[in-house]
C-alpha cells in the first residue's frame, strides 16, 4: 500500500501532474546558514519540496524559513526518527554521491537492508529510496522492483557524479544528465510492463535544459542540488529555481498539446 496519500495535497498533485520540483541542500550539508538560504530560495522560487540532511535542527530551521514540506535524507534508519518528530513529511534513503567520493559503494543487498530497517522503524512515513547509479542499468531496474515490494513509495534515480561532460554549454548539460535519464527510462519501462504505480524521481546532474527530458523519460518529479546551491547569492538561486519550475510546467503543456 502506497503512503503517498499521507503527503501534503500539493505534493500529491504535483506528482500526479509530473511536475514536482525538489531542491536538495545535500545529505552531508549540516551548515544551518547554507540550509536556510537554500530553503528560502526554494520557497521563493516556486519549488515544491526541500531535501535537507537528517538533523532535527535543520528540519526546524527549514520549516521556519519556508512553508514547503521537508524531506530528510540519510543512510542510517535510526536518524530518521528525530527528524520526523521535528516535522519532516518524507524520508529518503540516499542519495549516495558524498559516499562515492570516500570510496564507499552501496550494493543492492545493503540498500534493501536499509529499506527494511527503515520500514520497521517508521512503517507509516512515506519513503523514497535512491537506486545507486554504480550498478548496471538492468541491476538498477531489478533493485527498483525489489524496493517497491519492500514498501518504497518513491524510487529515485541518480548519476551526476559518474558523468564527466566533454562539452561545455547545452551539450554539456545533456551529457551530464545521461546516467539518471537512462535509469529513469529503464525503470519506468519496467514499471509500465509490471503495472507498478509508483512515482520516479530523477535526481543528480539535471538542469533547466534537461529536467523536461526526465519527465519525458517517465519521471514524476525531479531533484536538483548543485545547480542551485553552488550559487553565492540568493537572487541568483531564486532565479534558477524559477527557471527549473517553469521548464517543468512547459513540458506538461507540450505533452498536452501533442
Image (cartoon, rainbow, N blue to C red):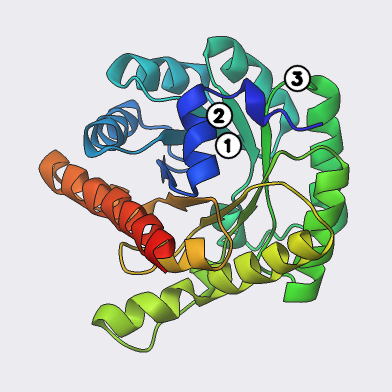
Residue shown at 59% from the left, 62% from the top: 218
Dot label at residue 73:
1
Disc nearer the start of the sequence (3/2): 2
User: Is residue 136 in sight in this rendering?
Assistant: no
Provide residue 19's location: percent of width, then percent of height: 43, 48
Provide residue 46's location: percent of width, then percent of height: 28, 37
**Residue 193 position by quadrant:** bottom right
**Residue 54 position by quadrant:** top right
Disc nearer the start of the sequence (3/1): 1
Disc 3/disc 2 C-alpha distance (Å): 18 Å
Residue shown at 50% from the left, 67% from the top: 216
- Classed neighbour count for the residue bearing mark 3: other residues with Cα under 10 Å, few (<14), some (14–19), many (≥20): few
**Residue 167 position by quadrant:** bottom left
Dot label at residue 124:
3
* Residues at marks 3 and 2 touching, judged by CB atoms closer than 8 Å: no
The residue tagged 2 is 54
* Residues at marks 1 and 2 touching, judged by CB atoms closer than 8 Å: yes
Amino acid at each position: 500500500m502506497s503512503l503517498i496519500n499521507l503527503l501534503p495535497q500539493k505534493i500529491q498533485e504535483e506528482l500526479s501532474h509530473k511536475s514536482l520540483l525538489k531542491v536538495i541542500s545535500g545529505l552531508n550539508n549540516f551548515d544551518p546558514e547554507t540550509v536556510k538560504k537554500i530553503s528560502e530560495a526554494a520557497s521563493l522560487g516556486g519549488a515544491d519540496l526541500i531535501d535537507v540532511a537528517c538533523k532535527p535542527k535543520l528540519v526546524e530551521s527549514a520549516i521556519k524559513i519556508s512553508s514547503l514540506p521537508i524531506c530528510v535524507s540519510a543512510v542510517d534508519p535510526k536518524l530518521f526518527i528525530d527528524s520526523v518528530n521535528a516535522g519532516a513529511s518524507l524520508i529518503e534513503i540516499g542519495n549516495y554521491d558524498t559516499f562515492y567520493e570516500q570510496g564507499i559503494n552501496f550494493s543492492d543487498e545493503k540498500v534493501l537492508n536499509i529499506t527494511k530497517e527503515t520500514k520497521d522503524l517508521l512503517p507509516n512515513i512515506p519513503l523514497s529510496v535512491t537506486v545507486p547509479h554504480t550498478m548496471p542499468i538492468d541491476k538498477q531496474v531489478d533493485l527498483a522492483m525489489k524496493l517497491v515490494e519492500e514498501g518504497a513509495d518513491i524510487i529515485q534515480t541518480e548519476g551526476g557524479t559518474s558523468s564527466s561532460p566533454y562539452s561545455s554549454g547545452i551539450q554539456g548539460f545533456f551529457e551530464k544528465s545521461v546516467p539518471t535519464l537512462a535509469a529513469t527510462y529503464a525503470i519506468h519501462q519496467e514499471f509500465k510492463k509490471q503495472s507498478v504505480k509508483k512515482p520516479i524521481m530523477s535526481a543528480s546532474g539535471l538542469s533547466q535544459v534537461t529536467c523536461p527530458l526526465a519527465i519525458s523519460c517517465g519521471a514524476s518529479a525531479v531533484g536538483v542540488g548543485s545547480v542551485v546551491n553552488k550559487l553565492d547569492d540568493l537572487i541568483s538561486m531564486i532565479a534558477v529555481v524559477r527557471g527549473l519550475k517553469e521548464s517543468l510546467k512547459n513540458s506538461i503543456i507540450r505533452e498536452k498539446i501533442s
